[in-house]
Amino acid sequence: MSTRLVSAGFLAVALVVLAQAFMIPDSGGYQAVGPRAFPLLVGIGMAVVAVIGVVQAFRAPVTSQGEDEGIHWRPVLLLIGTLALYAALLVPVGYWQATTLFFVAVARVLGSRKLVRDLVVGLLLALATYLLFDRVLGITLPPGLIRLAI
């Protein structure tokens, strides 16, 4: 699969995300930020990154050995599998637990070999986002197997 095809596919996914975000009804209430704000932000971010990728892919010269020589498919497939596993574990295991494991797994796939550091950083980031969303913003996240006492 060529870099051009992958970048164009990512742009198509970004456009689908944006189209779906615009289909979310606006609450029309007293909220300053409605339910479609975050999906729009994600869709816009994806579209910007995708456009940059498409431009870079079409500007790059095609080598005589083909475009795919720089794509390392093993980490890409491992990251996709890790993300799928994260989605499957999120509710039964819990947000902060699954997110910690996800962080460690992604760090390992990307080359980190410092397990203790990755666990500590992953746990701190997962707990910080859990507390921000669950306690401060009031957005319920799956508590999972071990509920926080705070």
Image (cartoon, rainbow, N blue to C red):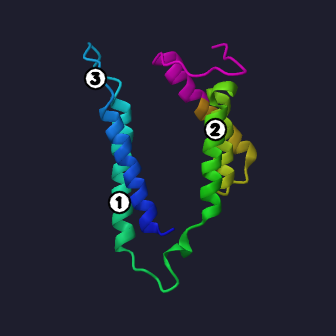
What residue did someone put label 2 on?
86
Q: Foreground mark, 3 or 1?
A: 3
Residue 135 covered by magenta stretch: yes
Going by the image, does 61 lie left or right of 136? left
Q: For the residue marked with disc 1, what is the amino acid?
A: Ile
Depth order, front residue of 84/96:
84
Residue underneath mark 1: 52
- Going from N to C along the chain, the mark reached first, 1 or 2, is 1
- The percent position of residue 20, horizontal first and vertical second, equals 35, 36
Residue 63: percent from left, percent from top: 46, 83
In the picture as drawn, the residue positioned furthest to the bottom comes out as 64
Tell me which amino acid carries mark 2: Tyr
Residue drawn where x is 62% and y is 33% of the image: 124
133 and 43: which one is in front?
43
Q: Which residues are magenta?
A: 127-150
Write the residue at 65% across / 53% down: 78
Q: Amino acid at mark 3?
A: Asp
Upstream in the sequence, badge 3 or badge 1? 3
Name the residue carrying label 3.
Answer: 26
Q: Secondary structure at mark 2?
A: helix
Label 2, label 3: how far apart the Cα atoms are: 30 Å
14 horizontally vs 3: left or right: left
Q: Which numbered disc, 2 or 3, marks the residue that appears first in the sequence? A: 3
Q: Nearer the viewer, residue 65 or 148?
A: 65
